[in-house]
Image (cartoon, helix red, strand yellow):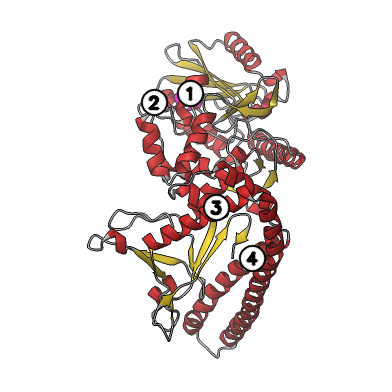
Amino acid sequence: MNNTPNRNLITALYCRLSHEDELAGESNSISNQKDILKKYADEHGFFNTQYYIDDGYSGVDFERPDFKRMLDDVDNGKVGVIITKDLSRLGRNHLHVGLYTEEYFPKNNVRYIAINDNVDTANPNSPGTDMAAFYNIFNEFHVKETSKKIRATWRIKAQRGERVATRPAYGYMKNPDNPKQIIPNPETAPIVKRIFQMCAEGLGPTQIAKVLENDKIYTPTMYEFKRTGTRLRGLNEELPYSWSARTISDILGNVIYLGHTLNLKTENISYKDHRKRIRPKEQQVMIENTHEAIVSQETWDIVQKLRAGKRKRTKSGYKSIFAGILFCADCKSKLCFVSGNTLKKERFHFICSGYRKKGKGKCSIHTINERVLYEIVLEEIRRVTAFARERTEEFAEYINKNSETQLKKELRDKQKLLDKHRKRLIEVSTVFRKLYEDNALGRITDEQFQILSQGYVEEKKQLEADISELETVIDEIKTKSSSSQTFIELAKKYTDIKELSQEILHTFIKKIEIHEKVKDEITGIKSQNIDIYFTHVGKMS
């Protein structure tokens, strides 16, 4: 390679600084790098200098704007020399740096110089050339160790209850008096409230997104861009109001709007791969009541119930407000909603999904007309809320007296089911071990083992998931007590209930169990029991 600089080609002076490098002090600052590179170029006769600067970019990530711009100029034959302060400024991934300095640059007739490391690709005998590979390994090792220290620092801060997120969630802003705290953003907090309210009224994420778009509400990324000029991932300047259902779902599931901080929810896959993945729940850190809530607990509970029991639109386009909260009193399966274009609305009804899917003999039909159920539940909510408002002390005494009995029964039923699952898990594990031994000893072939074991493997996974869920429920029951005062406050809030809405229903009703109809042998009249479980206070007789 000719060592004489070509005056017609660019001498690229590349500078890079990451957030971690900033901690090392002024020596690595962009201004310091620029001074060193310009002085070196002038003293060694390099002309037509041009700066390429990536400020705030990690050395392990080569998706840097100005680095890519420099490579484009290399590909187009515009660059003759590239100079950096040292090898670490080019990058801290030893494989990539080696690829560029040993293959890519020479292939494109580009001379590379790392001043402080004495590396010059035009001079194979330069003092640092033989050591370049080792420098690159040490540079990468530095990133790895720094990453460990930063993660450890975040973990300590998270466990102390400090926020580790760098940017407040949509709806919040940093407190001007204390940047470590967040407060509701007066411009976006009302939008968050509206999103939750629309969901509580029965709208799904896609419908909510459409409403916000029609009202010309900026998306979170567009709002941030308009406010600060920051270009967040997903920004689309051509569609500033185009909210996605995913964004709405993320907002509806974020506990930050309850006033809680969830730290360490995500992590980078590795120090080389900055993609995020969700941490297991047991590794996340929840700190309650760290800042002002935007959404009330009641609204949050309603929304989460609706989200957990997502209602599917039927072929007729109709969705029942009861879907997701109706259960068979005998087999405990959910009730399916039956409607259709050929079926009159007054004949829409629910039936036991256990009966419908598994057939007769597994359970009975447990059917109930939706309109009849609507009238019963509406009247029952009116009766119980009136009782709570008008005879507060008597209501509280009644609830506290019956709560303990209900909790004991619920605990007994759940514990019985847990014991049954645990027993079955032992049986399945024993059978699987026996199959494994038979396969290992040649009693059954590998193909036979795969066929026979597949069902047991799936059952084992399901049992383990069910057991974990039951253990959580049992722990909640053991620490649970009636919240009659909370129910009384809700009853005072809703004083004139004329009809059922999503919000009203899920504010007061936790679940409804439908019993099978029973025919009186003498009169021939059929009757049907319905158990309505109210939020906070349980079943009212």
Task: Please give the label number shown on residue 237.
Answer: 2
Q: Identify which residue is drawn at 46% across, 44% down.
A: 199
Q: Mark 3 points at which residue?
A: 508
> In the image, what residue type sits under mark 1?
Phe
C-alpha separation, residue under disc 3 versus residue under disc 1: 41 Å
> In the image, what residue type sits under mark 3?
Phe
Task: State left or right for residue 174 relative to residue 362.
Answer: right
* Along the line of sight, the residue nearer the viewer: 463 or 201: 201
Task: Please give the label number shown on residue 225.
Answer: 1
C-alpha separation, residue under disc 1 versus residue under disc 4: 43 Å
C-alpha separation, residue under disc 3 versus residue under disc 4: 28 Å
Magenta segment boundaries in residue numbering: 67-71
Where disc 3 sits, the SS reads helix
Counting the numbered discs, the total is: 4
C-alpha separation, residue under disc 2 versus residue under disc 4: 45 Å
Of the numbered discs 1 and 2, the one sitting upstream in the chain is 1
Q: Identify which residue is drawn at 59% across, 84% down.
A: 431
Of the numbered discs 2 and 4, the one sitting upstream in the chain is 2
Where disc 4 sits, the SS reads helix
Quadrant where the image shows the C terminus: bottom right
* Along the line of sight, the residue nearer the viewer: 15 or 196: 196
Where disc 2 sits, the SS reads loop
C-alpha separation, residue under disc 1 versus residue under disc 2: 9 Å
Of the numbered discs 3 and 4, the one sitting upstream in the chain is 4
Q: Please say if the residues under marks 2 and 4 sit with CB atoms less than 8 Å apart.
A: no
As drawn, the residue found furthest toward the left would be 342
